[in-house]
Amino acid sequence: MTVAELAFEEELAAPQEESQAQAVWRRFRRHRLAMIGLTIAGLLIVACFLGPYLTPFNSTDIPMTELLSLRDKPAFFQGSDGFHIMGTDSMGRDYLTRLLEGGRVSLALAFVVVIVTQIFGTIVGGISGYYGGWVDTLLMRIVDFLFTLPSLPIFMVLFVLIPKDVVPGGSITVLAIVFIVLGWTGP
């Protein structure tokens, strides 16, 4: 056996290096239902953020000319302003437009809250791990105390107590603040 043949065989026998992320993505791609779910979730996210361009209706406009005749028509009706795919409510507002607008607000709120709580929790955990001792003990007792609180009643009380007209962004910003204050400790 020559040196060239030996080097070639060693090259073939060497294992391919694959990162953890590549291994997870490879396994995820092979799972058909996971890919279908990812596609549906991606389409819903894109639809929510492109909502104003997908529907010709405004979510708050009430068609006054057709308001009286809505009682006699089914939910899917051909109005003077176009066909409503998901129908209209009792005031004549398009359900699809309102659904896409609500989805956009909810997704944006969730994205901001997750990013900020991850950053805040990482900073607190880093401080706790770096200093150790009494700082670690104090921070962990604070986290333990926050874990014992019932989430839903605290969310509701804080949402009512924080003035919405003082905070820029109104009630959505207040919701984000409440979720961040109580959510940085984890699940």
Image (cartoon, grey):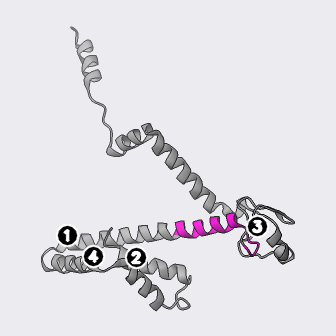
The kind of residue on which mark 4 rests is Phe
Q: According to the image, label 4 marks what residue?
A: 147
Gap between marks 1 and 2 measured at Cα: 21 Å
Q: Quadrant of the C terminus?
A: bottom left
Taking the view exactly as shown, the residue that stands out farthest to the top is: 1
**Which percent across, then down, holds residue 150?**
33, 79
Q: Residue placed at 36% from the left, 44% from the top?
A: 24
Q: Is residue 87 above or below residue 21?
A: below
User: Looking at the image, is mark 4 or mark 1 nearer the viewer?
Assistant: 4
- Helix, strand or loop for disc 2: helix
The kind of residue on which mark 3 rests is Phe
Query: Which tag, 1 or 2, sits closer to the chain's start?
Result: 1
Gap between marks 4 and 1 measured at Cα: 19 Å
Callouts 3 and 2 close, C-beta under 8 Å: no
Q: Is residue 153 above or below residue 87?
A: below
Let me know if residue 98 is in the magenta part.
Answer: yes
User: Looking at the image, is mark 2 or mark 4 nearer the viewer?
Assistant: 4
The kind of residue on which mark 2 rests is Ile
The kind of residue on which mark 1 rests is Gly
Q: According to the image, label 1 marks what residue?
A: 129
Q: Residue placed at 78% from the left, 76% from the top?
A: 62
Secondary structure, magenta segment, majority class: helix
- Looking at the image, residue 95 sits to the left or right of residue 167; the answer is right
- Range of magenta residues: 90-108
Q: Nearer the viewer, residue 30 or 23?
A: 30
Q: According to the image, label 2 marks what residue?
A: 180
Gap between marks 3 and 2 measured at Cα: 34 Å
- Looking at the image, residue 33 sits to the left or right of residue 6; the answer is right
- Looking at the image, residue 6 sits to the left or right of residue 28; the answer is left
